[in-house]
Image (tube, rainbow, N blue to C red):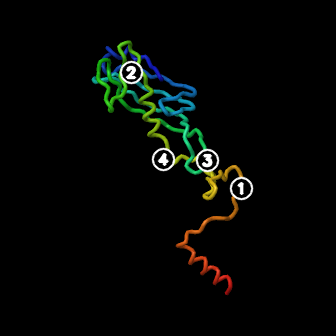
Amino acid sequence: MIKVNLSEFIHAKPGSRETIAFDIGNTIIDDLDLGFLKGKLHFTRVAYGILVEGQLDASVKTECTRCLTPFYAPVVIELEDTISLPGADLTPERPVRVAEDGWTDLAPLIGEYAWLGLPVKPICSPDCKGICPNCGGNINLGECTCGDTTPVDPRWEVLRTLVEKTDRS
């Protein structure tokens, strides 16, 4: 949970504004593991709710698409959304609202925007070598010991005979 007190915005005039800084350590939002969350969010009272906007830097635990090793990927969360006022219905478009006591949980918004900020194919490092196509071993941890027993697709076997013929010539 990432709770923020927005009670002063419930009855405030449109245009009222406040900035809140975040520096949160490891936290879990649903199935998303954040290593850290830092940045500033600006809250502005608008006619239909509270506009929240800003940028948060985070690290999200994910899996490398090359070697399948878990790691924390840096993510920049560009947040711009509206928080509903007390009594409003929650909808997929507006999953967050201020409670009657003025507190609101920003976790659903931050989690949604963090997922959007993740790279499509996260890679643990630019020089990641991936896994062996034969045995599935992580090549980053050392040379593969399965040997050179790469199965050849039978459709390409004709090319091997051509290579062998040119070697003999």
Labelled disc at residue 120:
4
Q: Nearer the viewer, mark 2 or mark 4?
A: 4
Give the mark nearest the N terminus, 2 or 1. 2
Q: Which residue is mark 2?
A: 17
Labelled disc at residue 125:
3
**Residue at image x 52%, y 29%?**
28
For this rendering, which residue is in front, 72 or 156?
A: 156
Q: Are marks 4 and 3 in contact (CB under 8 Å)?
A: no
Total numbered labels: 4
Residue 101 position in % (x across, y down):
38, 12
**Residue at image x 59%, y 40%?**
71
Amino acid at dot 1: Glu
Amino acid at dot 2: Arg
Please state, as top left, top right, bottom left or bottom right, where the C terminus lies in the image.
bottom right
Query: Could you say which quadrant of the image residue 15 lies in?
Result: top left
- Neighbor class of circle 3 (other Cα within 10 Å; few <14, some 14-19, many 20+) is few
Distance from Cα at disc 3 to Cα at disc 1: 18 Å
Relative side of 91 to 106, left or right: left
57 lies above or below 65: above
Distance from Cα at disc 1 to Cα at disc 4: 28 Å
Q: Nearer the viewer, mark 3 or mark 1?
A: 1
**Label 3: element kind:** loop
**Label 1: element kind:** loop
Query: Could you say which quadrant of the image residue 13 lies in?
Result: top left
Distance from Cα at disc 4 to Cα at disc 3: 15 Å
- Neighbor class of circle 2 (other Cα within 10 Å; few <14, some 14-19, many 20+) is some
Distance from Cα at disc 2 to Cα at disc 3: 40 Å
